[in-house]
Amino acid sequence: MNRFWRWRPAFLEAHRSRKAWLGLLRFMLAWPVLALLPALLAYLIGAFIGAWLLRGLDILTLDFWMVFRNVFHDRMIFGGAVGDLIHGIPDAGGFVTLGIGTVLAGSWAYRTPLMSWITAAPRFRWRLVVWGFACCAAVFAGGLVLQGVISHDGYHPDFGWAEDKPRVIAFYLTVSVLVTVLQSSAEEVLFRGSLMRQGWMFVRNGPVIIVLSASAFALAHRELDPPRLLQLFLAGLAFAWVAMRSGGIEWSMGMHAAWNLAFDFITDRSDLSLRRGDHLGVVSQWERFATEWAVFLVLPLLLIVTTELVLRAPRLRAMVDLNSNAAAEPGP
C-alpha cells in the first residue's frame, strides 16, 4: 500500500475477492435485468405520477399527454419550485430502482450479504445518518452566510416557494423531502457503494477509486456548465472520502441529503443561467466562480475536515455511533 494511503478502508476490503473477474461478469449479466430495465420502467411511472399531480393540483390545465411528454423528456414548459420538483420525481424513481437493483445484482454476483454494500458495520447506523445531515446543514448554512458577506453574486437564499398556495406549499415540502432523500441515498449506493467497492477489487489505490467515483458522480448529473460540473466533482470527492473513512455510506448519505435539500429549499439559482449564444459565456461562468468560492471549494473541504475531526475524537465517535471496526484504521 502506498505511503499516501495510510489507512485500511474496511468498507472496501470486505468485498475483496479472488474471483473478481468472474463476479464482474455475473454482475454485468444480472445488472440489466435487475437494475436497468426496472429503472426505466420506474422513470416512466414517475413521469405519469408527475403529470397526474400537476393536473390534480390545478397547476396546469393543458392536455394530460402533453404534460406527460414534457415531464418524460425533461422539458420545462412550466416554471417555479413545483415545476422543478415534478421533473425530479421520474429521476428519483429511476435512481432508487437502479440503486436497489444494483445492490441485488452485486450481492448475487459476488455472493455477499446485501448489507455489506451499505456498511462494513454489523448494522445500519441511523444515528450516523442524522449527524451527517446536521453537520452538512450547518456547514452549508455557514457557507452561504460567508458568501453573502463577501459578495452578493452567485447563490443566495430564496424562499419564493413559500409564497404559493397553501396546498401547493404542503405538497412541495412533503414530496420534495421524500424525493430528495430517496434520490440522494440511491446515488450514494450507486457511486459510493457499488462503484467504489467493485473498483477496489481491480484497482488497489484509494485516491484513484475516490477520483473515479467523483468523476462518475459529476458526469451522471449531465451538467454542461463547467463551474457546476467542477462543484459536483468536488462534492463527489468529499462524499467518497467520507464513505471510505467512516466505513459505510450512512455518514455520506446524511450529508448528501442535507446538501440537496439546501439547494432545493434555500438557494436561488435562477440568475446563474446564461443566455444562449453569448460568446462571453465561458468567461462569465469562471468570473462567477470567483464569487462562489464558499460553495464550490470550501464546503466540500469542510465536510472532509468535519469527518476527520469526528473520527479522531473518541467522544464524538461514540456520540455519532461511528463503529471503530468499520471506520478506516491506520495501516502499516
Image: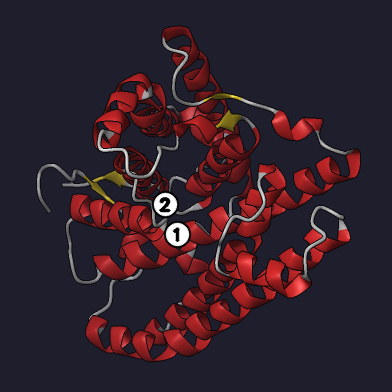
Q: Is residue 308 above or below residue 56?
A: above
Residue 65, by quadrant, is bottom right
Furthest residue in direction top, as rendered: 149
**Mark 2, residue position:** 247
Query: In the image, 104: left or right of 54?
Result: left
Q: What kind of element bears circle 1?
A: loop
What amino acid is labelled 1 in the image?
Ala
* Residue contact at pointers 2 and 1, CB within 8 angstroms: yes
Question: Of helix, strand and loop, which one carries label 2?
Answer: loop
Q: Is any atom of residue 269 visible in this view?
A: no
The answer to whether residue 158 shows anywhere in this view is: yes
Residue 188 percent coordinates (x, y) = 47, 56
Say if 73 sits above or below 175 in the image: below
What residue is at 57 percent from the left and 82 percent from the top? 38
Where does the N terminus fall, quadrant-wise? Answer: bottom left
- Coloring basis for residues: secondary structure
- The x, y position of residue 79, in whole percent, is 66, 46
Give residue 120's mark.
1
Measuring 33% from the left and 45% from the top, which residue is drawn there?
229
Q: Nearer the viewer, residue 184 or 63?
A: 63
